[in-house]
Amino acid sequence: MPFAVGGYTLADGETFLTRCVEEWDQGVNFNFAVVAPDGNVAGSCGIMSPRPEGGVEIGYWLHVAYTGRGLATKAAAALVAESWRIGAAYVMIRHDEANVRSRAVPERLGFAFTERRTPAVEVNTAGRVGVDVVWRLERPAPTSV
C-alpha cells in the first residue's frame, strides 16, 4: 500500500488511529479493524470519501497472511450494508488495475465496472500500474411487502 512505502512505524500507526477517531467524530470516514477467526487483526476497512449525489467510497486492506480466505469480501459486504443503513445512494470501490484480488471483491458483490482512470496523485510502488479501476453499486430499490 502506498501509505507503507518506506516502512510503517508505531508512530505512523498511532497517527493513523488518532486521525481515525477525529474523522469518525467529524462524520467523514469510518474505519474498522478486520479481525480474523483466529482473533488477530488481519487488516482494516472503511467507509470513506463522501461522493457527489450522496454516495460513499469503501476500501479494504488485509495483511498478506490473511488473503484468500474471503475476509475482504465479508468486510466489504458489511461496509455495503452499513452504507445502506446510513443512507448512501451508492457505494464505490476503487483499486489499482494490477490488484486482481481487490478486483474479485466488487465482482463477487455485484458491483458494476464504471471506468479506468489515472489518479491525480500516484505513489509508485511495486505491484501497481498506476491505473485505478472504479466499481459502483446502486442502492437497491425498496421492496414492498
Image (cartoon, grey):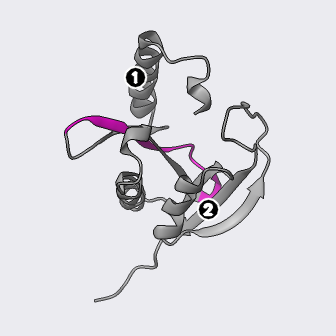
Which of the pair 112/107 is nearer the observer? Answer: 107
Residue 81 at x, y = what percent? 36, 61
Residue carrying label 1 = 17
- Image vertical order of residue 89 relative to residue 1, above or below: below
Mark 1 belongs to which amino acid?
Leu
Mark 2 belongs to which amino acid?
Trp
Which of the pair 105/31 is nearer the observer? Answer: 105
Quadrant containing the C terminus is: bottom left
Using the numbered discs, state the Cα–Cα distance from disc 2 to disc 1 in whole angstroms: 27 Å
Secondary element at image label 1: helix
How many tags in the picture?
2
Who's the residue at 38% across and 39% down the image? Answer: 65
Who's the residue at 61% across and 62% down the image? Answer: 135
Residue 98 at x, y = what percent? 67, 50
Instruction: Identify the residue at the far top of this view.
Output: 11
Residue 140 at x, y = what percent? 46, 75
Chain part drawn in magenta: 39-53
> Can residue 92 be seen in the rendering of this structure?
yes
Residue 41 drawn in magenta: yes
> Can residue 90 be seen in the rendering of this structure?
no
Residue carrying label 2 = 135
Secondary element at image label 2: strand
Residue 71's disc number: none
Which of the pair 89/92 is nearer the observer? Answer: 92
- Image vertical order of residue 31 relative to residue 116, above or below: above
